Amino acid sequence: MSKLDVLVLEGDGIGPEVTTEAIGVLQRACELGGIALSLEPGPFGGACIDAHGEPITQAVLDRASQADGVLLGACGGPKWDALPTSKRPERGLLRLREHLAVFANLRPAKLFAALADSCPLRPERAKNFDFLVIRELVGGIYFGKPRQVTGEPGHRVGENTLVYSEPEIIRIGRVAFETAQRRNKKLLSVDKANVLEVMGLWREVMTALAKDYTDVKLEHMYVDNAAMQLILRPADFDVLVTGNMFGDILSDLAAAATGSIGLLPSAALGEGPGLYEPVHGSAPDIAGQGKANPLAAIMSVAMLLEHTAQRVDLAGAVNDSVDAVLNRGLRTADLAKQGETTVSTQEMGTAVLAEVEKRLS
């Protein structure tokens, strides 16, 4: 790809801070890699509510469809928590995912060697784990209907619907199997087939798909057991595929195992533009203080370069640069042990940028 058109949605809280550092890395990597980069900002989340009365506008949705990719910072915060669910910042994110039809969410979880001491797991459990959670992103209970609260106060009933069709399971399953083929040819499908009919269908479809990928070893696990095993033996896992809600929970659990949620990037992929964002939230308690860890946002840019720009070389340079700054001992507040010197959001971003230049110049 010689041209790259990216819509930037900084969002709320620490979103603008970490996105600024990620954009700096993206711009330099594209410049050194011969890619003409075009960036356009747009309102999103709580900031969009304040300006336009809704978490995302139709104009932004339309622009997202025209871009090659979308880079997102974060959304939400206590300021907007009292709004109805349909009007909160997070609803804008769901609308964006649905609009772009980005059904496959890739969330890598890796224990960096330099941060082994930050992992809350015992060393013999953690080792050097490196696995990928593939989360179905535009179906399941987050989108199923009916979704409502009915009845009079004191007798109200809340209702959400967990629905997956066979075609939805097949398309996320194929992404998972093909990803496993490029890694270590191991795939774990996570469900709750023992109590949920829809998950029984999920397991049946995944089992049938395995016949098309005979080089991949498929295993199944109930989600409660999977959560336990990810803590007990994370190094045994390679690629996991699961539904929307389970993937949301398991990938945050994986974040804790890495030592900080500030280390997890993500890519949401479909047939059109990809959506790239750090897994962490808006962290309004530290917004504007220069304490946020920009590495997840920077590694999200690496995923953009890999999957949208199709430049594995540039993505590798960015990821290697993150490794390098951590190996040098640079730590933002979330990564530092007691007594260790910390660097600011900007200082961490600048350090990664210098390493990228070193590798690509």
Image: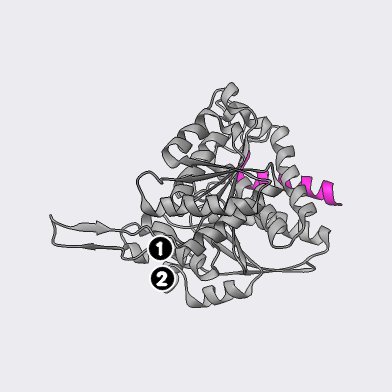
SS class, disc 2: loop
Residue 360 within the segment the image draws in magenta? yes
Left or right: where 229 falls relative to 269: left
Nearer to me, 223 or 345: 223
Q: Position of residue 276 (x, y in %)?
A: 60, 58
**Mark 1 or mark 2, which is nearer to you?**
1
SS class, disc 1: loop
Q: CA distance from mark 1 to mark 2?
A: 19 Å
Residue 245 within the segment the image draws in magenta? no
| Numbered tag placed on residue 263 in the rendering | none
Left or right: where 240 falls relative to 78: right
Q: Amino acid at mark 2?
A: Glu
| Numbered tag placed on residue 54 in the rendering | 2
Q: Amino acid at mark 1?
A: Phe
For mark 1, what is the residue?
Answer: 143
Q: Main secondary structure of the magenta part?
A: helix
Report whether residue 322 is seen.
yes
Q: Residues within 10 Å of mark 1 (few under 14, many from 20)?
A: some
Q: Where does the magenta region start and end? A: 343-361
Q: Above or below — where is 111 with respect to 351? A: above
Residue in the image at 41% along x and 70% along y: 54
Nearer to me, 158 or 327: 158
Q: Position of residue 198 (x, y in %)?
A: 40, 55
Q: How many marks?
A: 2
Report whether residue 277 is seen.
no
Q: Position of residue 175 (x, y in %)?
A: 61, 56
Q: Quadrant of residue 237?
A: top right
Residue in the image at 75% along x and 60% along y: 310
Q: Which of the two discs, 1 and 2, labels the residue nearer the N terminus?
A: 2
Nearer to me, 281 or 256: 256
Left or right: where 327 falls relative to 221: right
